[in-house]
Image (tube, rainbow, N blue to C red):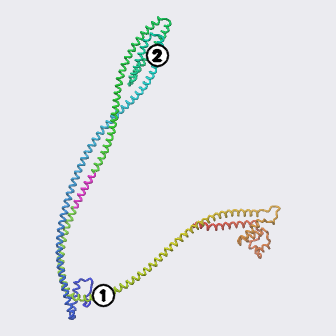
Amino acid sequence: MSMALGVPRDGNSSPVDSMELILSALHSNLEGNSVSEVMELKQTLTSFEKKIAELEGGLQTSEHEKRELREESSHISRTYDAETAKVRQRESLHLKQVQVQQARSDDLLREAEERRKILESELENSLKRLSSQTADYEALVEVEDALRRENEMLKDSAGELSTLKRELVRSAEERAAIEEQCHELREKLEYESHPLEELRLRLQNLEQENETLRTHTSGTTSDDELSSLLQIKDSTICELTYKIQVLRDELRNQSASVKTGDTGSQLAEKELEAQLASFTIKSNAAQAALENQIEELDERTRRLRLVETALKNTRDECDELKRALVQAESARRKSESSSKVLNNMLQKEKESLERELSEERRARDESEQIVASMQESLQLQEKKLLSDHQALQKSIREDDEQKHKRIEELEMAAKTSAAKIENLERKLKRKDNELQLSQQTVVNLQGVLEDFQESQNSEIESSLSTLKRELNFAVENKEMLQKQLTELQQNLDADKKLFFEKDEMINSLNVTLEMFKETNLAQKEEMARILCEEPPPGANANSVEKSVVRDLLVRYFGSGTRAKREVLEIIAKTLLFSEEDMAKVGLVQGGLLTTILGGDLSKDSVSEKWVEFLMRETEEDIVTDANLVTPEEEKNSIH
């Protein structure tokens, strides 16, 4: 209908514009329309009125939406106030926590400072104890040195004591020998004279006293006393031996005098009695002195034992002091290590506390910054909400005005759009028919497409089956070719092996060929030498050796065309062919022998011809050998 009214169609035009265009078209075409068209317009107007009623309902719903928006804005403002209150409460709690943590960190710092002071005082006390222990250790070291010196002195005195003991043993042996002599003397005296029994008894008493003295002196331990006793004993023994010697002399004299007379014996007995009396007095004095010395020795041994016990006690004390010194050293080390550990712990605690304090300060600064930023953001949000609220109210008012204007425009456009709606309904029916036709065509096309797809699927399946068969065939061919390839590889390996064997054989043949060449060259040189040599005197000048003729014939029949002619010339020279013979064998034809041979044949000697021929042949052999070797070398280089 829009086409019938002449209204331009634009997909981008609004409904109001289209309604205005429809109404203008209706007013312009109203005069030329019929009554039926007027009725259609009335129907469209009624439909437009219904739509206007619907639009009014939509306006009411928009009013409801406005109220909902206002309620939502009020709800947003309330939630904003609640959120700001919560944020402020959280900020206050966070500030309280920060203050509590700061107070806790201050307490920890104070405790750490107190602990540091306590540890420093303990460290000073331990250092003092350590210094006192070091002083004790030095005193112990001095005591130990003194004890070591005393021990060395005791060792020296023990050595001297051992020497004295050895001297005592030696003196005891001497005394035993003296006792034996005295026993012999007593026996002699018993046999010689009976008046000397009293003297013998006194001597026995002296010996017993000497034994007691020896037993007393053997248990002593003091070095000085033993030496003094030994000196006294030695002196007494010397005196006794001297007296015994004197008595022995007197007894001898007495025995001599006994023989002379009894008067002399009586005088001698009196003198002996006087001497024995003086000897008993001296022995009693010596015994008393020995008893006094034994008592002094006992006293000194007791003192020495006391000194030894004191020395043992001092050694024990020294050992205890050493152990105490070791313990003090270990305690000092432990105290040093503990002081180091405590210092490290204090340093670590101090660093950790400083880190915690810095973290707390940083957290407090961050919290203050966060609070300030949140306050700023809250203020900005308040300002933004106020501006948004004002803008929303303004937009609501503008929307109301626009909606009122729009309603008026729609009311105006509703009247003009009825005809267009009817036209559109007609076009809709026509479009429905076209749609049905298009649907039918679509159905037909769908069937055709399905048939095409089925045919394509069948073709694809057939092609897939053929491709599968081809693939299987290709796989079989591949396996067969793989087998052939392996066989060819095996054959190639065998050929390579055979080639290497042949190459080795060729090398060996080349070696043998070189050997044959050398021998051949030697033979040729020998033949040339034989030919060049003059025949021996008495030999026939026309005679030729059979070996030379045989070699020339073999060369002739085994060489090429050019070489045959040369060999033939040499044979002619060797066998002294005439011109007729040369013509018969083809060397001379119609006087062209000079031109062919390059001059008179008789000018060159047979030996020169033979040497030139051999030289050319060796050169040709070398060239042919080179040509034979180079393909092998090429093969080797290729392989």
Up the image or down, 282 lies above or below 638; here it is above
Query: Which element is circle 1 on?
Result: helix
* Percent position of residue 222, x then y: 38, 24
- In this rendered view, identify the residue nearer to me: 349 or 169: 169
> Farthest residue toward the right?
538
Asked where in the image residue 131 lies, by quadrant, the reply is top left
Q: Which residue is mark 2?
A: 183
Q: Amino acid at mark 2?
A: His
| Quarter that holds the C terminus | bottom right
Do labels 1 and 2 touch, CB within 8 Å? no
Up the image or down, 75 lies above or below 39; here it is above
- In this rendered view, identify the residue nearer to me: 297 or 7: 297
- First along the sequence among labels 1 and 2: 2
* Percent position of residue 274, x then y: 41, 9
Per the rendered image, the range of residues in magenta is 351-370
Query: Which element is circle 2 on?
Result: helix
Up the image or down, 506 lies above or below 299; here it is below
